[in-house]
Image (cartoon, rainbow, N blue to C red):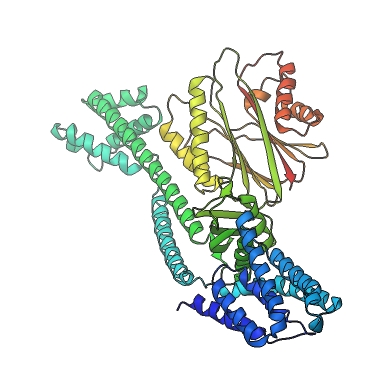
Amino acid sequence: MRKTGWKQLALGILGALLCRISIMGCYPFVPAFFAAVYLEEKGRWLLSVGMLTGMVAYLPITVIAKYAMSILLIGVTVRLSEWVDKRCYAVVAAVAAAGGTMALSIFGGIFDLRNQVTPAAAVCEAVFIFGFVILAAKGVHLFLEEPDKPAVLENVRDEYQEQRLLKYARSFDGLSKTFLSMSRRSEILPEDVGQIQQEITGRICSGCDTCAICWAPANHTMYGLFSRLAGNLLQTGEADDETKRQLEENCRYAGHIQREAEAAFEQVRVNKAWYNRLLENREMIAQQLDAMAFIMEDCASETTILDAEEKRRLSEIRYRAKECGIVAQDVHLFKKNDGHIQAVLKVRSKWGNCVAMRDLTKVVTGALDLHMKPHKDTKTFIGKEETEVVYEEKPAYHAVHGMAKLIKDGSDISGDSFSFLEKEDGELVLSLSDGMGSGERASKESELVIDLLEKFIEAGFTKDTAIKMLNSAMVIHGENELYSTVDISSVNLYTGEASFYKIGASATFIRHKNGSVECLLSTSLPVGVSFEIEIEQAKKQLSDGDFLVMITDGVIEYLNTDSPEEVLEDIISEIKTNHPGLLAKKILDQVMLYTGGKAEDDMTVLAAAIWEN
């Protein structure tokens, strides 16, 4: 017999033995214990047989009918509740057991005057039964709950996977350092000049009768002339007149030597350029390997399983879910790197009906004593098919965002692109890119920037790494010198801390609840211009009611004023609204007053507000 079967048999035997206990002429453990155990679906027949056997063996014949009717009423009530509402709370069984027994004690006594129970005793018995059912139901559930045996194997497997990820991460990190250790040779070195000299003299001077005299160790004339020629070629790409004249005076093949030297230096310069590009690609690969190492290390240490320490909370989740008509299996708790709790459950409806996901949310929130929320792609209802649900701690803040944009006069499409990304880990990422120029080509370039940026961030890369990888892709992809700015505002909705990353981007403004406005500026180049990129960063603490305003340069460049940032600060502070979309629209309306109603460039305004939950 399975372990659970032995437990059910033990409960049936215990129920029979409890029938011996009498208090003030009453047997309150009979209905109380029956109700507490009957709430569990498994082993009901064992319980019923055990209780009836104990009643027949230990109860006076005159009260058997009373308690038999009581447990019958309890059984009918529980089954009706499960049939109608597809669930049965412990309080329902407790009320049925206490109320039914008290009614039978008072009104049933009319037919048994000899063993009549006083009203006071009947009330006390009912109170005892109610309290016992409420307290014992959870204990019975914990007793019958099967231990999660596969958890040990699962933990071992997780530890093995973690070690493998860390091993891979160290390998990628080592490859990254190897690539980055390769030095870049961007100039023609003295040994290169010597090699060119040997090649030219070998081809031209070796057949000349005066070669031994011109290039004799004691004769420094040709050595000096060639050094001057090499210096001219390195600086301007051609020899100056004085060098040509002296070369012609000392060598009958001066013109030939000059042409060969120019061709040789040009070939070396091209080779160096390709070599440098190869090293740049190696650095790009090194950055990507470094990013992969970071991702693997982050995945390996992303969460700590709390199942062993939080058995009581896991059991509480299962018990409360059962009361709501939900079967919760494979319930696990994790503590993430940021210290927040994550719950993962596999759930299904017990009776095959649809149960609202908000009921499970209340269960998890109550059991963990934390504000929890399911992932945004979670189903609205729980059905008979088992589904996995992931819960995260609810952040302290929530964000509302909006935007407004205008297209450059004469254009059909905006060269600005943007995105609002709210991640499951409580991070809000606002991204804005302005493609150089306007029209379709600028639009495609900025769309590519935003698309790549979103993919990198969703994959878990840090903002710095994502921007560097994006820039590497843009340098390789870049055509016709089309570049794009990158402006990122990242808000941690748990703490309210905001991080700003700017590459060639326009100003960002923070409007505080008290009406004051801060301005963050950037002076770096756009992405795609150079392999080396400068990322300007800043951190600010936001609070309830603060607004973020991000703009493209078209909004601020045509204000026709000496201090456009200050003018825009005044505009933002004077607009009285708590609606981000309306704020963005009103900013553009005010800017158009300064430009005379003309949009001389694409204009985009993003606005976001954070509020306490």
Task: Count every numbered label the image shows and give the total.
Answer: 0
Instruction: Pick out the residue farthest to the front.
Output: 111
x and y percentages locating residue 524 in the rendered image: 58, 35
Viewer can see residue 393:
no
Residue at figure coordinates x 61%, y 54% from the top left: 392
Front-most of residues 208 and 255: 255
Q: In the displayed structure, does residue 470 sit left or right of residue 567?
A: left
Front residue of this view, candidates 68 and 474? 68
Q: Image point 53% across, 51% down: which residue? A: 383
Identify which residue, 187 or 387, lies in the foreground: 387
Is 291 located above or below residue 318 in the figure?
Answer: above
Q: Is residue 105 above or below residue 393?
A: below
Relative to 219, is 117 on the left or the right?
right
80 vs 224, left or right, is right
Q: Is residue 80 visible?
A: yes
Q: Quadrant of the N terminus?
A: bottom left
Give how far across and how far down residue 455 sits, in percent.
49, 41
Residue 315, image x, y percentages: 60, 68
In front of the other: 540 or 546: 546
Residue 126 in the image: x percent, y percent? 78, 73
